[in-house]
């Protein structure tokens, strides 16, 4: 990541590990952070009221998560 991000930005980043089947952000919750997927894959999905869900996207390393909500 040092090749892509400035030293000042790297000093202010926090690493958060998410396990398989764990949620990063819950649907309907307020998003206060911008996340950068460093390694692995992440599925962005939306749950419907009747229990089904739609997959919006599957993100890979160096994807920005939460950009639509923040910007």
Image (spheres, helix red, strand yellow):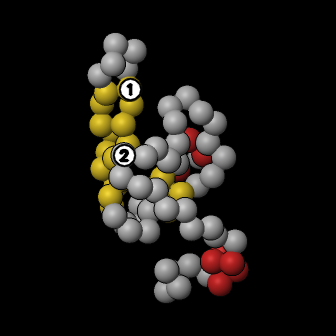
In the picture shown, does residue 50 fall above or below 2?
Answer: above
Question: What residue is disc 1 on?
Answer: 47
Side of 14 relative to 21 (left or right): right
User: Which is more toward the observer, 17 or 3?
Assistant: 17
Q: Are marks 1 and 2 in contact (CB under 8 Å)?
A: no
- The percent position of residue 23, horizontal first and vertical second, equals 46, 44
Residue name at image x 66 percent, y 75 percent: 9
Image quadrant in which you'd find residue 48: top left
Mark 1 secondary-structure assignment: strand
Residue name at image x 44 percent, y 62 percent: 37
- The percent position of residue 58, horizontal first and vertical second, equals 30, 50
How many marks do you count on the picture? Answer: 2
Residue name at image x 69 percent, y 78 percent: 11
Earlier in the chain: of badge 1 and badge 2, it is 2
- The percent position of residue 6, horizontal first and vertical second, equals 62, 81
Image quadrant in which you'd find residue 13: bottom right
**How packed is label 2: few (under 14 Cα within 10 Å), some, or many (20 or more)?**
few
Mark sitting on residue 21? 2
Side of 41 relative to 71 (left or right): left
Side of 16 relative to 59 (left or right): right
């Amino acid at each position: 990541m040092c090749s892509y991000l400035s030293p000042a930005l790297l000093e202010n980043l926090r690493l958060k590990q998410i396990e398989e089947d764990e949620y990063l952000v819950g649907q309907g919750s307020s998003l206060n952070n911008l996340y950068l997927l460093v390694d692995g894959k992440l599925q962005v999905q939306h749950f419907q009221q009747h229990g089904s869900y739609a997959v919006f996207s599957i993100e890979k390393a160096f994807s920005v998560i939460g950009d639509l909500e923040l910007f």
